[in-house]
Amino acid sequence: MKSTKKNKKKKLAAAAAALAIIAAVSGTFAWISSQDQRINRVKTAAIKDGSVTVSEIWRPTDIIPGTETDKQVTVTNAGATSVFVRVSYEEVLKHLADKGVVSTSTTGWVAAATPSIEDSIPVEFDGKKYVDNVDYADITSAVKVSGAVLPANVKVYGKGAETINPLNGEKHIDFDYAMFFEYETGKYQAMRHTVKPVNTGANFSDWTFEATDLEYEIYANGYKYEVANWANSTLVGNTTEAMTAKAALLGTAGTKYGVDYDYKAASMNLGAEKLNRTLAVVGQYPTTSGATSSVQTDKNALNISGIHITYGTDIVTPTSLVNKKWAYNIEDGYFYYTSPLGASETTPNLLEKLVFDNKIDQQYTNATYDLVVKLEAIQGNKAALVDDSGWGLSDDELSTPNTKKILEHLSGQAPN
């Protein structure tokens, strides 16, 4: 019996020695890691990888000046071992190239056979409000332009009455109408026009009308995109999900939790360099708990800081690190959780709200804003913090003093 145990111990020792030799020869080690991203789209999701995920309470809303929406973001570790976590953002703002200025065309809008983001956009009109209203009659056939019928798919709905003053016999005409272009079934384009009654009478259905000055409203030159990548990803992405070499959504396309996205540079008519990191400046990241800070893209594209993030109450700076808090590192663009995140543990809120400032104006017309919350998690080990297959953090005090402080703080809480 003792001989058998000794043989087993010898075999285990030999196996351990062999693994040590393999590790020494290869010179690399793939640290256990995880990534997660959530796309939150607001207008005028997530990639789950492993057991560490972005959790949130998210209430989608429209971009309305002076309003806010819940956006409570935490990180949850559903795994069995402790991990280090950090979070950053990718932003995508889609806005009208002419920033909400309305132009006109002499013809109704027709979708291009090969659509482009630079195609003009029809100014939408709520034609259904009149089509479905029993108080308004379809008077399209009674309206003429220089004696001819209206252009195809132009619709006119109206109501009116003729009254005679019994005292002086004067005629009074009440007339209200709406004209619009139906560019697709149930979709309507706004128009500029003048419609006047030509012949009136007691029965509105017998009236005739003359239309002049017909123009079709458009947003010329289509859309533009502005992107901001707060931090370049370091962990290798999942190529089976068509991700790039690093775990990021910028540069990729797909559907995440029902949100369709296409962040390829070519699709957005951007140079590939636009997907690289853009440094956040003072006012775009929190320095105190509960701070409200602006995002990057609307300031870059529209020169207005209209979209803001309200942060949680557990924010510290790299110069005053406290355990179980969030600290923003301007040197690499990540928010670091200042302690290892244990098994079945959830961080305090990093974000609390999205806030839409009263500065928001017509430049945000038809805009959509995507805030991608990007998570990176690695094994809760000192070596994983500095290894190139982990986060590869530098402890160079001269060039990266904040990173050095964060690295020292995290290393002091981790096993060797």
Image: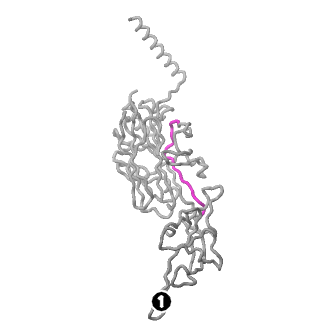
**Residue 330 in which image quadrant:** top left
Which residue is drawn at the image coordinates 62% and 67% (left, top)? 108
For the C terminus, give its image quadrant: top left
**Residue 154 in which image quadrant:** bottom right
| Residue interval drawn in magenta | 220-236
Which residue is drawn at the image coordinates 47% and 43% (left, top)? 46
Which percent across, then down, holds residue 218? Answer: 58, 66
Name the element at disc 1: strand
Label 1 Cα crowd, 10 Å radius (few <14 / some 14-19 / many 20+):
few
Q: Does the magenta stretch include residue 117?
A: no
Viewer-closest of 55 and 172: 172
- In-image side of 45 versus 240 (left or right): left
The kind of residue on which mark 1 rests is Ile
Viewer-closest of 365 and 411: 365
Q: In this view, does 334 lie above or below 68?
A: above
Report which residue position mark 1 lands on: 164
